[in-house]
């Protein structure tokens, strides 16, 4: 077969070379992808191995449920940190969820197009603001507000560096994520449903509440789970406003000490005591494991939801 | 009729000489003769007992066909009967779909393309494709036409210039775009884009041109231009068209294949086919009982 | 009967309120940073290295952090692109549409995307200790690269998986091998690559937890890969913990600087997306 004056022989040679290049590319890209994916596994294994030292001398159960955190004495009770992490995460979801849902519905169902042009960039910017800037805002605005304005109504004294502060700051950080996911999910609900309900005399809100929310429920749950995994791992902003006190918080106005903050604050100590280093690695492993679980689970649910709608 | 390839090759040679590529003109001489000889031997496509399963659905059932070279063959039938699948089986584009299972033989140039040793890229070069929606590559007009040639080893600017001009002229685009060869192909109108895709496909010197409802997305005027191009091109290329309208087949077909629910019901030269359809289903389809 | 209308009105107000709250938060954050940062912002901040005693009030600026961040983010972005584009190409062109390998690969990258930078940092720290490496520019680059590869892959894959099948079919029918379609694919997903880059850069430049134990911190500009490097977020963090109010104010100025950089990145990302989607094929 000739083309434009290229002889059969030359064409054949070139063809062989091209096919070879294709096969080589295939292989190298496969390897590259494989290595990248295995990073996940390597991370998990690595962190687990590093935790072995402390798991050898303390049972996992004790580590997870004891409240005594005296590393220099060899006591590593992670409960205060786990409690702190849970408290802030839970609080942030409680604050962020209603706001995000309502905003999401507003943007998808009610707002005029120009509002979207306004709000989407705003969400982008909020999502892009780095952790440390949130922390600065938290210490300048939220913490004093809690200490001076909110706190006195409830407790005698609070420094402001509290679970509440962490919860509020965290909630603002996850709102952009939730709203953008919600808008995406709500937009995939087919208009037929809205039309059908409207022709039965439902008001806009009733449609949103009974049809959209119900239909989008699996997607909403998946989005919340995603936001939770984001909240669990957030380090710097929370570190700056939570008080860093290794005690289980009993009220919103107590200080707390979430896991990421524990790791971040004490990395310097890691080099001095191998047991301490192992304990912090264990903390990282807990985070890794929980987030792996939550993320994989929510992605799978989200995909099922998408499949349902694309039927 | 057979002087057309001769003229084409002479034009080729003169363009090359004019571009100052004397040496290449010499080899073009032998190339041209070879080309003429290749074109003299008509090579039909033979399909024997072709069965295609996709994800468990038996899409093509026991297809036995001969598709003549240097003629326009139209594949007609109601939607969903497997026309596009048949087309894609001929250039093995069907391979890119998931869950595909193929049985049977398709002979092109006397070789079974489903043989294990067939080099797919080489096969595909023999079959130019014109999709339903124009698919200009995301690059300039010039680069679009030159793309295939570059892949097959033609890199010199001078040669490419000649090729680009030749095939843009062949599809009637040259005058319209000669001043903006480096502007993005996406800026062209749909009719122009489809002609560009045709020029691009012709530039790799295929043997057959496959058209998958290539005019259905175009306005009537562009549509007619493409049809006229097909009629001219059949002198040098075998043309296989999946047509969505009976009228197109009536206008330009030399050979017709009627498909229904995955089976090739009837085939034959256009005159006979339209005047004396043998099969009941064919008669019904032609008279518009279903479409 | 009337209840549903009252309900409608109440929720309309609530929805407006929610949206307003979100915007108000943004406003509050930006205003606070500007209000506290602007007064302390001056040319010195941007162009000088921290002098001795910078953290207790003496002269200097944050040039160390600006350059350090630039080095780390720049190198990571380049390496990230070089790694992610082949991966995305592989997933979308070499693998079949619904392959199991593709599913698991995408899932893995989704999970990697969700893992917080502190875990990446801790892991990288463990590796560095194992190999006897000290905190360095290289360490920071490695961590940030690992951090942003999932971001690259995820955003580019979103665009690449929507490649029109016809386009690839047409390229194949010109006799192209799969590798040879890379030209077409990259041109087609170019806007996706641009947004992914901006997203990744934004994330990389603002991250503190990952670089904390890996890049270390220093008051000078690193001249080799094995020297520690300063980063803007950490610089802000350290300045904040100073007892001297001047230093704290400088921290706000640095925070303002970082925010401005992010704002520029974010808005230009939007702008590019907007511009490209008009010219889409």
Image (tube, coloured by chain):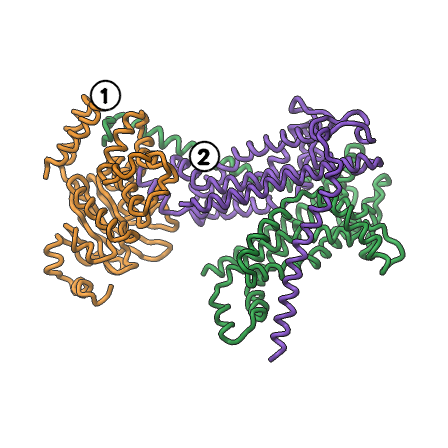
Chain colours: A green, B orange, C purple
Q: Is residue A131 above or below residue A179?
A: above
Residue A124 circle label: none
- Residue A262 in which image quadrant: top right
Residue B166 can be seen in this image: yes
> Mark 2 or mark 1, which is nearer to you?
1
Give the mark count.
Answer: 2
Q: Viewed as shown, does residue C93 lie left or right of B4?
A: right
Q: Which residue is painted at 53% across and 42% down in the image?
A: C195
Q: Position of residue B5 (x, y in %)?
A: 14, 35
Residue A286 visible in the picture: no
Quick one: quadrant of the N terminus of chain A? top left
Identity of the residue furthest to the right in this view? A156
Q: Foreground residue, B282 or B32? A: B32
* Quadrant location, the C terminus of chain A: bottom left
Asked which secondary structure carries label 2, the reply is helix
Q: Chain of mark 2?
A: A
Quadrant of res A18: top left
Mark 1 chain: B
Say if labels 2 and 1 share a chain.
Answer: no
The residue sitting at the bottom extreme is: C1
Whether B167 is drawn above or below A10: the answer is below
Farthest top residue in view = B23
Measured from the top left, where is residue A183 in percent x and y?
A: 56, 57
| Left or right, A167 with reference to B39 | right
Q: Nearer the viewer, residue C200 or C1?
A: C1
Task: Please provide percent x and percent y for residue C136.
Answer: 68, 28
Residue placed under numbered mark 2 in the picture: A27
Element assignment for label 1: loop
| Location of mark 1 (residue) | B20
């Amino acid at each position: 077969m000739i083309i434009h004056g290229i002889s059969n022989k030359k064409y054949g040679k070139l063809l062989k070379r091209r096919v070879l290049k294709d096969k080589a590319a295939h292989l190298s890209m496969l390897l590259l992808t494989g290595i990248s994916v295995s990073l996940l596994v390597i991370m998990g294994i690595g962190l687990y191995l590093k935790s072995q030292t402390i798991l050898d001398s303390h049972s996992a159960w004790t580590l997870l449920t004891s409240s005594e955190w005296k590393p220099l004495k060899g006591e590593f009770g992670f409960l205060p940190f786990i409690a702190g992490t849970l408290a802030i995460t839970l609080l942030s979801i409680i604050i962020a969820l209603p706001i995000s849902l309502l905003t999401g519905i507003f943007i998808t169902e009610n707002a005029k197009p120009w509002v979207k042009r306004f709000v989407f960039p705003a969400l982008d910017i909020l999502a892009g603001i780095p952790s440390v800037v949130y922390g600065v805002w938290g210490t300048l605005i939220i913490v004093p507000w809690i200490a001076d304005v909110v706190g006195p109504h409830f407790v005698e004294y609070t420094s402001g560096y509290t679970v509440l502060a962490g919860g509020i700051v965290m909630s603002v950080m996850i709102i952009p994520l939730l709203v953008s996911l919600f808008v995406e999910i709500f937009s995939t609900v087919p208009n037929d449903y809205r039309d059908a309900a409207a022709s039965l005399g439902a008001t806009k809100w009733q449609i949103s509440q009974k049809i959209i929310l119900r239909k989008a429920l699996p997607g909403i749950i998946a989005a919340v789970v995603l936001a939770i995994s984001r909240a669990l791992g957030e380090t710097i902003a929370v570190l700056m406003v939570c008080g860093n006190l290794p005690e289980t918080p009993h009220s919103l106005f107590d200080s707390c000490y979430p896991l990421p903050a524990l790791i971040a604050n004490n990395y310097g100590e890691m080099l001095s005591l191998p047991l301490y280093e192992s304990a912090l690695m264990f903390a990282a492993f807990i985070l890794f494991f929980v987030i792996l679980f939550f993320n994989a689970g929510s992605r799978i649910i989200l995909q099922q939801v998408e499949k349902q709608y694309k039927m | 009729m057979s002087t057309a390839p001769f003229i084409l090759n002479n034009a080729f040679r003169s363009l090359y000489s004019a571009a100052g590529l004397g040496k290449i003109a010499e080899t073009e001489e032998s190339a041209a003769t070879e080309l003429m000889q290749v074109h003299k031997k008509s090579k039909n496509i033979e399909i024997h007992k072709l069965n295609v399963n996709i994800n468990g659905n038996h899409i093509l059932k026991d297809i036995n066909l001969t598709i003549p070279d240097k003629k326009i063959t139209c594949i007609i039938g109601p939607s969903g009967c497997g026309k596009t699948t048949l087309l894609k089986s001929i250039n093995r584009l069907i391979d890119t779909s998931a869950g595909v299972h193929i049985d049977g033989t398709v002979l092109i140039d006397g070789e079974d393309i489903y043989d294990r040793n067939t080099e797919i890229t080489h096969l595909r070069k023999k079959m130019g494709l014109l999709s339903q929606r124009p698919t200009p590559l995301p690059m300039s007009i010039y680069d679009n036409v030159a793309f295939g040639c570059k892949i097959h080893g033609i890199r010199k600017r001078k040669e490419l210039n000649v090729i680009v001009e030749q095939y843009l002229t062949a599809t009637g685009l040259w005058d319209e775009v000669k001043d903006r060869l480096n502007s993005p192909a996406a800026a062209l109108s749909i009719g122009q884009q489809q002609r560009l895709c045709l020029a691009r496909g012709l530039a790799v010197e295929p043997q057959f041109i496959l058209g998958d409802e290539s005019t259905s997305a175009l306005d009537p005027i562009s549509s007619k231009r493409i049809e006229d191009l097909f009629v001219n091109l059949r002198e040098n290329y075998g043309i296989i068209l999946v047509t969505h309208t009976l009228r197109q087949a009536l206008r330009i077909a030399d050979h017709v294949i009627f498909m229904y629910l995955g089976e090739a019901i009837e085939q034959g030269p256009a005159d006979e086919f339209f005047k004396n359809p043998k099969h009941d289903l064919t008669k019904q389809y032609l008279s518009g009982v279903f479409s | 009967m009337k209840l549903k209308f009252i309900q409608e009105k109440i929720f309309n107000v609530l929805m407006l309120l929610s949206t307003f709250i979100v915007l108000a938060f943004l406003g509050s954050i930006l205003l606070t940073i500007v209000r506290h940062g602007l007064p302390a912002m001056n040319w010195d901040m941007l162009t000088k290295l921290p002098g001795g005693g910078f953290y207790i009030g003496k002269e200097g600026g944050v040039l160390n952090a600006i350059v350090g961040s630039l080095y780390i983010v720049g190198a990571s972005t380049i390496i990230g692109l070089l790694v992610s584009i082949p991966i995305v190409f592989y997933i979308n062109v070499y693998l079949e549409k619904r392959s199991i390998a593709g599913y698991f690969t995408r899932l893995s990258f989704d999970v990697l995307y969700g893992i917080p930078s502190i875990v990446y940092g801790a892991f990288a720290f463990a590796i560095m200790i194992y190999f006897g490496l000290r905190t360095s520019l290289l360490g920071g680059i490695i961590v940030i690269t690992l951090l942003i590869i999932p971001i690259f892959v995820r955003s580019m894959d979103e665009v690449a998986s929507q490649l029109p099948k016809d386009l690839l079919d047409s390229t194949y029918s010109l006799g192209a091998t799969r590798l040879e379609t890379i030209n077409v694919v990259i041109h087609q997903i170019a806007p996706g690559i641009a947004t992914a880059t901006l997203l990744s850069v934004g994330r990389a430049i603002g991250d503190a937890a990952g670089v904390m134990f890996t890049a270390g911190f220093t008051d000078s500009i690193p001249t080799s890969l094995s020297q520690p490097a300063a980063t803007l977020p950490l610089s802000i963090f350290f300045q904040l913990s100073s007892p001297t109010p001047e230093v704290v104010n400088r921290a706000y100025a640095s925070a303002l600087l970082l925010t401005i950089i992010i704002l520029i990145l974010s808005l230009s990302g939007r702008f590019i997306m907007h511009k490209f989607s008009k010219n889409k094929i």
